[in-house]
Amino acid sequence: MQRILNDPDNIVNESTAGFLRAHPDIVTTTANPRAIQSVFNHDDRVGVVTGGGSGHKPAFVGFCGENLCDAIAIGEICSSPTAQAFLDAFKAADRGKGVACLYGNYSGDNMNVKMAVRMAKKEGLTVKTVVCNDDAASAPPEEKNKRRGIAGEVIMYKIGGAAAATGADLDEVIRLAQKAVDQTRSIGIGLTPCTLPAVGHPNFEIKPGTMEVGVGPHGEPGMEVCELETAAQMAERMVNVIMGDDLPLEAGDEISLLVNGMGATPLNELYLLFDEAAKCLEEKGLKIYKSYVGNFLTSMDMMGASITVTKLDDELKPLLDMPCYGMGLKQR
Amino acid sequence: MQRILNDPDNIVNESTAGFLRAHPDIVTTTANPRAIQSVFNHDDRVGVVTGGGSGHKPAFVGFCGENLCDAIAIGEICSSPTAQAFLDAFKAADRGKGVACLYGNYSGDNMNVKMAVRMAKKEGLTVKTVVCNDDAASAPPEEKNKRRGIAGEVIMYKIGGAAAATGADLDEVIRLAQKAVDQTRSIGIGLTPCTLPAVGHPNFEIKPGTMEVGVGPHGEPGMEVCELETAAQMAERMVNVIMGDDLPLEAGDEISLLVNGMGATPLNELYLLFDEAAKCLEEKGLKIYKSYVGNFLTSMDMMGASITVTKLDDELKPLLDMPCYGMGLKQR
């Protein structure tokens, strides 16, 4: 394992310390070392919180910032934050207008968020939630509650954070973040497994010469393992899954297209995949209104990429266009 | 080779197409497919150009943008752009005030830039150059002309682009970019080799359990191969090389610290290394005025990282602080 580490059991503390030290213009501590908050104080806004396991940087701490999330709960590597971490993030984010907790659909996160929401209620703090389940490969449409949240979470944070910045109340922030999720579909292709530092070797396998369609960010099994394809074939396959899902996408619709790297895939390959996916979508008459390419929600040293399509309208477009400033997403 | 590709010989065209399609708010084409330009037209400024081989994204195209470079010459994977590509980038960047070509010290780039400067002169265009040679591990101080340019190039682009944005004339932009180079030292540690897609296997070796101190971005040999160390030991080793070089760094000096990933090293490890390097530098009394952590100048799927220290003063600080907007560097 060729990695830059001290103690594999202390990675989260150490990398969080570096993150806080590097970006004092964006983030700062809370009393809980497993919750950080943005330095931007907007007393008149609904608070926006997310959180999740570590090892996915820039997710989740990179989406703390201006017009994004106000506080983040931090878990161990590939493990949910505690309920206490979520609660402390809620408290840090709250400005008396309530808190929108926007997070991904994983059992540990679901459990801890629910507990934290109950704990918050006892303290008089209103928290409402949106669970991102954009991964179209992880369950059929009729079992959407089983679908994972993957890079579509970035669109959820962007829309939720922007909605809060407009001065919308809690129900409206929740409605818009939920709408972003409802109008978003993603699918990934894994090319190599990742290695958890505390384990030292991959805990799942993707054989060289093959690819895992729909792999999850922790190596959760996908839809299919097949032979490695060209970028054009991968793009077509992914676009077909998204177009074949239950979100109506018709010629003339405006969309955003986000291509997310899983960590170790070179950036030039993400741009190459973006170009292929964009061509496929445009051939179907869709109009790409906004583009994102990069590493947003990674799985440490996993190779592979996902694509995320969001169907836009006149309500979502200005929210997506709003400037924002976090380590993982800067837009002007 | 688990990569997202169509034709290994057409990667540069395809990924450049994706890059241009994704960022129409920042970059656009020129008549030469191997030169791109920024969409920001500032008719009263010196033009700033860089260029280099491909496979290092975000370098070099990611540093095209507002208050950064105005045009970029694009080479094949790990191969210099042609003289014609540099010339066409010069022409795209020129606003009648001359062009500063800021590039890295590699033999192919040196040759092609020199040729392009002569070709430009014949056409009545004045181009002056700064060659970045920040890699302290690549030759002793008395042979500085042999040193490679690595991630310190990012600081050179930032300072040069900001200098041009202040309205400085060509000689002044060159002086400031050269000053940025003179006051910058870097060193990298390689943990794995990278694989050129057209070759299909690594063309150099870093044995598991070892690390190559001072490795170049194309696998050029470093100072030393030794056993893999902890992040703290790596940071101390790198800081000692920089502090032991010929740039006087004394307690009380203000610096910027940039930690650059070589491509496949997870971002949380870059933050962890940043924290260790920052602690080492602060123990020596240096003050970190500005921090950068991320993938800036990569080597495709190589694992490893470099650190870059720039000694700042009242002239460089406002230039480093100036907002900028390119794919690879966004600052407000």
Image (cartoon, coloured by chain):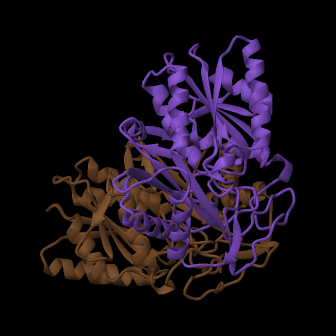
Chain colours: A purple, B brown
Give the quarter of the figure containing the N terminus of chain B: bottom right
Residue reaching furthest to the top: A124
Which of the 4 quarters of the picture holds residue A291? bottom left
Q: List x then y, in percent, for residue A239.
A: 51, 63
Kindly identify the residue that appears in the image at 46 percent across and 44 percent down: A330
Residue reaching furthest to the bottom: B199
Kindly identify the residue that appears in the image at 30 percent across and 83 percent down: B83
Question: From the viewer's perspective, is A274 left or right of B260?
Answer: left
Residue placed most toward the observer, A285 or B319: A285
Kindly identify the residue that appears in the image at 44 percent across and 83 percent down: B10
Which of the 4 quarters of the picture holds residue B141? bottom right
Question: From the viewer's perspective, is A207 left or right of B250?
Answer: right
Q: List x then y, in percent, for residue B282.
A: 66, 43
Q: Is residue B127 visible?
A: yes
Kindly identify the residue that appears in the image at 29 percent across and 61 percent down: B70
Question: From the viewer's perspective, is B228 left or right of B259?
Answer: right
Residue placed most toward the observer, A216 or B236: A216
